Amino acid sequence: MKVALITTVYNAMPHIERCIASIRPQLNEDIGWIIVDAGSTDQTWARVRSLAMGNPFVDAVQCVSGAHPIPRGRARHIGALLSPAEILIHAVDGDTVYFDDAVKRIIADFEGAGRIPTAGDSFFAITRAGYFAAGGYNQEANVEEDLRFYEALKTREPGFRVQNLGIECEHLNPRALREAAKRPDYLKLREEQGIRLFGPPSKKKGGRRK
């Protein structure tokens, strides 16, 4: 496996089916998918486990810590630990649909830029070696773990990019998207970079894609 998509989920049943349906056709021997369940109490884990058992390109693990889900930063870090891939694509969210060749476009852009860490519209690409060299996500953080890591990367990796590729994706949970866009660290990064990290729901001619 050359590339691993890493998804963390928690009680994602309202959206996980459409996410799976969009990503599954984009997997192959070089592109695998690691799904970390942070301790769901609905049927998310059963669905994710079933997917992994029936697909050689999918691995899944459930993490349970008492009565509460594990922090999202820890779940994302566990995904990186489990992956043998050279390239990690984090922030592949379980409430987002990735259309057409979105994954291939992310990989092509990352390779074309010399594998410089890149955050974009619903993805974050980095080499596995680079991830661990930078210390990885804050494992106690449940919010803003991504932006904290980006800030750390900016000091280590002068070429760190925030790149909106305009990939075809649709966010199925707009409320969460709006809340994320209000986060102080996100607003700061948006002002510095002059670009969005979270794109709007994807649209095609004739309306939103289904």
Image (cartoon, grey):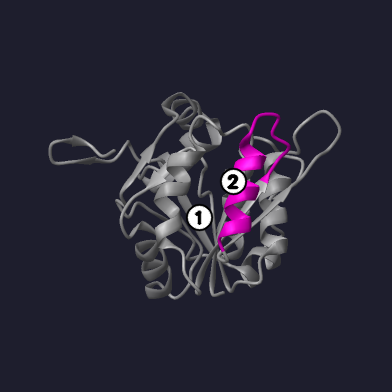
Count neighbours of disc 1 (C-alpha within 10 A) and say few if under 14, some if 14 to 19, many if 20 or more: many
Q: Residue at x 64, y 35 (%)?
A: 10
Q: Visible in this render: residue 122? A: no
Picture disc at residue 146: 2
| Labelled pair 1, 2 in contact (Cβ < 8 Å) | yes
Residue closer to the observer: 156 or 14: 14
Secondary structure of the residue carrying tag 2 is: helix
Q: Is residue 72 magenta?
A: no
Q: Residue 115: image x %, image y %?
A: 48, 72
Q: Quadrant of residue 32?
A: bottom right
Residue closer to the observer: 127 or 153: 127
Q: Residue 95: image x %, image y %?
A: 48, 37
Segment colored magenta: 37-55
Q: What amino acid type is highlighted by mark number 2? A: Asp
Q: Residue furthest left?
A: 206
- Please state, as top left, top right, bottom left or bottom right, where the C terminus lies in the image: top left
Picture disc at residue 124: 1
Q: Is residue 50 magenta?
A: yes
